[in-house]
Structure formats: C-alpha cells, structure tokens
Image (cartoon, rainbow, N blue to C red):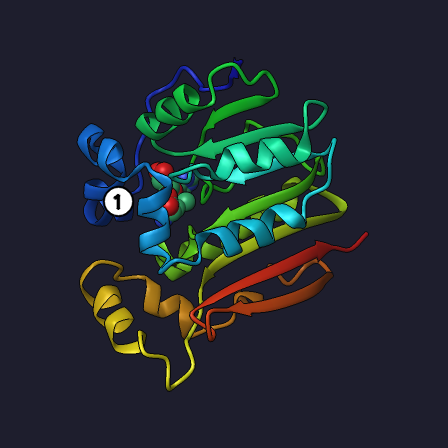
C-alpha cells in the first residue's frame, strides 16, 4: 500500500474543525459512525441505491480519484468495481480519516492515500488530466459555498479529457416530501452549509473556462442528486 502524505505541517479547514469535529475528527466518533448501517440511516435507507449509482458509472481497470473518505464500504465498492488493474487515489484533509481508511483497506495494493485540502489552489499529489473518473460523495454540502468551486476545479483538473466527475449530494426535495421539514431542521442545527447547496445547482459551480456534458439524476423524491460531469476535450 502506498502513502502520499507529505512531510509538512498540515492545517485543517476552519469549517471542518468548527462544524464537523464531532463527526470526523475524534477517534470515538469514527468507531461509532464508520458502519454501513449508520451511513444507511443517515441517508434514510438510500445508501445502496446512491452508492450503486456511483459505482455503476465507473469502469473496470480505470484510475479513479475519491474526494474525501466516506464511512462504510464506499471505497471497497469502488475497488471491487475497478478491479485489481484499476487504481484508486483517495484525498482527504484529515490525517485521522486517512489512517482509518488505510486500516479498513489493508491488503489492497492499488490504493493510495493523499493528505491534501481539496479547496487549495494547487494539489500536489496527483497529475492533471490523469484520472478516468472522480467521485465526490456528500462532500460539497459540508463546505462553505465559496470553497465549492475551487474543489470542483481541482477534481475536474485531475480528469483526462472525456473523464467523468460524479457528484452525489443533497438536493431540494419535492414540496410534499415527508422528510422535508426534518431535513430543514437537520440542515439548521447540524449541517449549516447544506442549505446553500440545495438552493443552487451544482452545474452553476463548475469553472466557466471548460466545456462539459452534464447528466443529472434525482433520487428519493428529489432529496438527493447525482450529477455526472464529463470533461470535454
Ligand atoms: C466525504 S465527507 C462526508 C461523507 C459522508 N457523510 C460519510 O458517510 O462519510 C467527509 C470527509 O470529507 C473530508 N473533507 C472535508 N473537507 C475537505 C477538504 N477541503 N479537502 C479534503 N477532504 C475534506 C473530511 O475530513 C471527512 O473525512
């Protein structure tokens, strides 16, 4: 197993420390939350469908970039899909998350771990135009709006022409959705940046200096979305 964690002091983004320490930065939280059934509960029983939709867009024997660690078996599903001749690169800004994922994926030889902030203007760990696909699974709603475009710029920059960025995240649910008001409370008290994501379209966050093909699919009466962005040559 390879590691690409740089030997330099590392700073966690303020939004992550202030808002999500309880979820991602404490060993006890990881022990408690890093289970498939917890991910499925948080996603209201939709995790298999959402993860399946992402994995189905990946091809065997390809190079895939995963933007940030995800609890449960998300990365294992990707590795199964791309097979032994594929390669997975996982980027996360939190050393504790990368260490946890490294332990979960022990024995996999085709995965590398990269300690990087995806919102920084330059990401040293991977080459531009080198990946066939990139996955961004429920990350954007956790960051302030002004940092979303820099993160997407990095992910698109990593793609080969014709490569796909698969973004999965919250979406504004249908008016009659029974969970609409519960989700409004979750956003208000636990996910303070999420409303600013569902108020806009992910397409509007794409850097304007490139051309894309876009596909959008809604899940669970619109509470979730998957946007597949194909980078044009
Ligand atoms: C993918 S998101 C949420 C995933 C989902 N809620 C789950 O089930 O795990 C959580 C991860 O994003 C990472 N993260 C947040 N901001 C980041 C950034 N700017 N660059 C890289 N990783 C980041 C956190 O450290 C954390 O491991």
Residue drawn 41% across the image and 15% down it = 7
185 vs 206: above or below: below
Q: Residues within 10 Å of mark 1 (few under 14, many from 20)?
A: few
Some atom of ligand 1 lies within 8 Å of the CB belonging to the residue at label 1: no
Q: Residue furthest bottom?
A: 176
Residue 84 position, x and y percent, is 68, 22
Q: Relative to residue 39, is residue 132 drawn left or right?
A: right
Residue drawn 39% across the image and 19% down it = 103
Residue 161 position, x and y percent, is 78, 46
What residue did someone put label 1 on? 14
Q: Relative to residue 47, is residue 181 drawn left or right?
A: left
Q: Is 179 or 137 nearer to us in this picture?
A: 179
Ligand 1's image quarter is top left
Residue 125 position, x and y percent, is 55, 27
Residue 76 position, x and y percent, is 52, 32
Secondary structure, mark 1, is: helix
Residue 204 visible in rendering: yes
Residue drawn 47% across the image and 41% down it = 118
Residue 143 visible in rendering: no
210 vs 219: above or below: above
* Quarter occupied by residue 126: top right
Q: Is 165 or 149 nearer to us in this picture?
A: 165
Residue drawn 33% across the image and 38% down it = 35
């Amino acid at each position: 197993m390879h590691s690409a964690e740089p030997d330099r002091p590392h700073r966690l983004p303020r939004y992550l420390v202030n808002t999500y320490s309880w979820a991602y930065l404490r060993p006890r939280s990881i022990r408690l939350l890093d289970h498939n059934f917890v991910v499925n509960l948080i996603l209201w029983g939709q995790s298999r469908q959402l993860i399946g939709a992402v994995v189905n867009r990946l091809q065997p024997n390809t190079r895939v970039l995963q933007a940030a660690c995800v609890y449960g078996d998300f990365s294992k599903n990707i590795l199964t899909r791309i097979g032994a001749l594929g390669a997975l690169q996982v980027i996360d800004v939190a050393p504790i998350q990368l260490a946890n994922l490294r332990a979960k994926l022990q024995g996999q030889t085709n995965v590398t771990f990269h300690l990087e902030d995806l919102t920084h203007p330059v990401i040293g760990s991977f080459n531009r135009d080198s990946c066939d696909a990139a996955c961004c699974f429920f990350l954007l709603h956790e960051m302030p709006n002004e940092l979303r475009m820099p993160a997407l710029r990095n992910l698109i920059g990593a793609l080969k022409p014709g490569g796909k960025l698969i973004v999965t995240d919250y979406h504004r649910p249908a008016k009659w959705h029974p969970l609409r008001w519960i989700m409004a409370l979750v956003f208000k008290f636990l996910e303070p940046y999420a409303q600013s994501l569902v108020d806009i379209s992910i397409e509007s966050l794409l850097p304007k200096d490139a051309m894309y093909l876009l596909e959008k699919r809604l899940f669970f009466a619109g509470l979730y979305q998957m946007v597949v962005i194909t980078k044009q040559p």
